Amino acid sequence: MLELERTELSVQRERAILVKVLSERLDPNEDPLAELGSLVRAAGAIVVDGLTQRLHKIVPKTYIGRGKAIELAERADASEANLVIFDNDLSPAQIRELEKVLNRKLLDRSELILDIFASRAQTHESKLQVELAQLEYTAPRLRGMWTHLERIAGAGGATGAGKVGGIGTRGPGERQIEIDRRIVRKRVSVLKRELEQIDQRKTRAVRSRSNCFTVSLVGYTNSGKSTLMNTLTNAGRYAADKLFATLDTKTVRWEIEDCRTVLLSDTVGFVRDLPHRLVASFRATLEEALHADLLLHVVDASNPVALRQVNAVHDVLEELGCLALPTITLLNKVDACADQADLQVLESRLNNTLAISAQTGEGLDAVVAEVRRAAQVGTLSVTLAIPAGDGRLIAEVDRSAKVLARRYGNDHVEMDVVMDQGLLNRLSGQCAALRVVADESGS
């Protein structure tokens, strides 16, 4: 067979046949290859065929068994597919064995998701995060990428001397693998240092907003988080009906009447079996969710597997350590629900839910009311008298509190504000001349 190029993860414009191994019984109305097909199309490939197999025990060598692998190769030939994609995670050895039978490139689920992230990364930070995840995925697979050099004499098996691995018998194949492994290890170390610095800056930036009430949108990919953010704040966030349309976190000020400053963040979407390497690499990006005062979990209520998607999001939140944060579950896309009974099932199975449509605006008044109620806990409505010459303090109040009105005197500025008690204590400590003219506790 022709030697396979496994140095790139791109699947653009290729014809793909999809494979999924089932270990449990599925809902008869559920298409087991639907999500994988969406992922493949998001990566730019064309889906030409699909195959599912129910197995109670995975075959260690080829995952699906040699007979099924031969059948898969025949179907790939018939459909002229040049790429096979598994909805399962395969070991490097399984990928090598299957590629020998299939005679074409093979990707597993993690590799496909990494490819999508690589194609969508726009900022320097997200590019570094994706590169780190890709290198950590590729490192244990380097041997399979250099099998074409093993035929050279001395390459650990091509000659009698090579078989015993004597001194001086190691050929360029093994040396190249070792060189690549050193390069990968060095690059991984560099990326981790850069991302650690980014993580520290991100953490400081998030903590500097401690005086504001922070809300993070979390949810399964393509659940409508970006559309919701645009509807609530006119943020101009890119939104499209495709998986992982946005990877970068965006934080904007959310103006809510009679409420202290609220910051709303949109995070990267989650997906079932999201590779742990990506969760670790994108930890800095997800810092907004880690330090949020409130999570808005956006669920695509029109999706027939919405409950499974909810569980997938909970798994990622638990891995990040923020599953216990106060959360409101937003059942989005209710305008697209074909059967209202499905919506009632979700409402009965999930806690603290609100039915909304980010597209039409239905139910968003209730969302604003709930966020206002949560943000006003522990806040004060006060009138501050600030020395007119203390521009820094005035700017700090403008930035960290909700300013309702201001009046200018000869030597001071009076500001009616809604603010956190901790912020008031900190500002009073910074400026002895700061006076509280009127004080009315919030709810």
Image: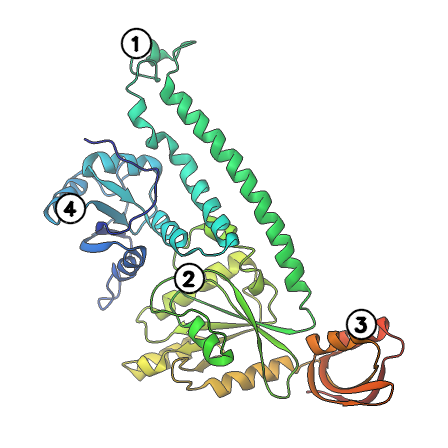
Considering the image in quadrants, where does the N terminus appear?
Answer: top left
Residue holding disc 2:
312
Residue 200 vertical position relative to residue 428 in the rendered view, above or below: above
Which residue appears at 40% of the width and 54% of the height? 117
Q: Earlier in the sequence, mark 2 or mark 4?
A: 4
- Asked if the residue under mark 1 is in contact with the one under mark 2, i.e. CB atoms within 8 Å, the reply is no
Answer whether residue 60 is visible to the viewer in this image. no
Element type where label 4 sits in the image: helix
Q: Earlier in the sequence, mark 2 or mark 3?
A: 2
Mark 2 residue type: Ala
Q: CA distance from mark 1 to mark 4?
A: 38 Å
- Asked if the residue under mark 3 is in contact with the one under mark 1, i.e. CB atoms within 8 Å, the reply is no
- Mark 2 vs mark 3, foreground winner is 3
Q: Earlier in the sequence, mark 2 or mark 1?
A: 1
Residue holding disc 3:
426
Which residue appears at 49% of the width and 88% of the height? 365
- Mark 1 vs mark 3, foreground winner is 3
Element type where label 3 sits in the image: helix
Element type where label 1 sits in the image: helix
Residue holding disc 4:
76
Element type where label 2 sits in the image: helix
**Rendered image: mark on residue 160:** 1
Mark 3 residue type: Arg
Q: Position of residue 17 (x, y in %)?
A: 20, 50
Q: Nearer the viewer, residue 335 or 62?
A: 335
Mark 1 crowdedness (10 Å alpha carbons): few <14, some 14-19, many ≥20? few
Q: Nearer the viewer, residue 133 or 93?
A: 133
Which residue appears at 31% of the width and 80% of the height? 336
